[in-house]
Amino acid sequence: MKWKDFVITDAPWNLDDKPPKVARQLDYTLWGDNVTGMISIFQNVKTDLLFVWVINAVIQELFEALNIYNWTEPDKKLHWRNKNKFGWIKLTNRGNEFYGTGHWNRNASEELFIFARPSRKPIRLDLRSHFREERKDRTVKPRWFEAQLLSDLRLRGLEESAYIFSGTDKDKMLLFKQLKFDIDCVDVEWTK
């Protein structure tokens, strides 16, 4: 992957969960270890602005990976800093809050964290920190929001982008290509 103005990643988070009953399984390979997988992203992504989709159950592991990477990377210019986040409140097709799955609570939201290198100046996006959008499918991210985010970033001169996503959905790949993202799929273990 060549250097990009920004990268968005939808990692294949592994909940390593043993629910009371087996639910419908995802049809793509999950990370064996979330911390190691995320450290690989922090190490290998070539950008100074990184957006990371994360489900609430693994936020701690995301920051554990960030801390490990920043401690082991001697060049402080390459460290990552958490700058902010967006919160997606998932809605049904009727506009009600989605009644999600979960073993501790009914998860109906997801977060998009913004990480930047120390040299990265703020981008001052015009998007609100929380938004409500219909949840189309179990692994599909909010299309309206991502189109707005992409548009806002491009208005600020950030053109070169990549989307690193989990899954094997060819329709998602087509959508991202229409939004002019370079695509990397992490269905197979992602290392470059």
Image: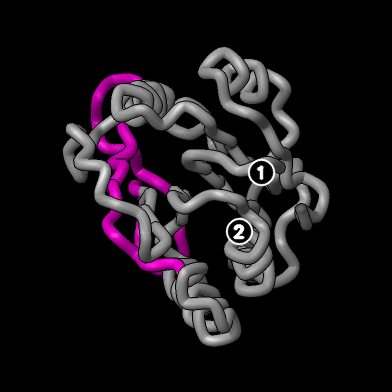
Looking at the image, which residue sits at the far bottom? Answer: 71
Q: In the image shown, does 49 or 177 lie closer to the viewer?
A: 49
Residue 89, position as x, y percentages in the image: 28, 41
Q: Residue at label 2?
A: 13
- On screen, 50 above or below 70? above
Q: Which stretch appears magenta?
A: 80-109
Tell me which numbered mark, 1 or 2, is placed earlier along the sequence: 2
Residue 15, position as x, y percentages in the image: 59, 65
Report which quarter residue 33 is drawn in: bottom right
Q: Residue at label 1?
A: 166
Amino acid under label 2? Trp
The answer to whether marks 1 and 2 mark residues whose Cβ atoms lie closer than 8 Å is yes
Secondary structure category for the residue under label 2: loop
Q: Main secondary structure of the magenta part?
A: loop
How far is the residue under mark 1 from the one under mark 2? 9 Å
Residue 140, position as x, y percentages in the image: 53, 32
Residue 125, position as x, y percentages in the image: 22, 37
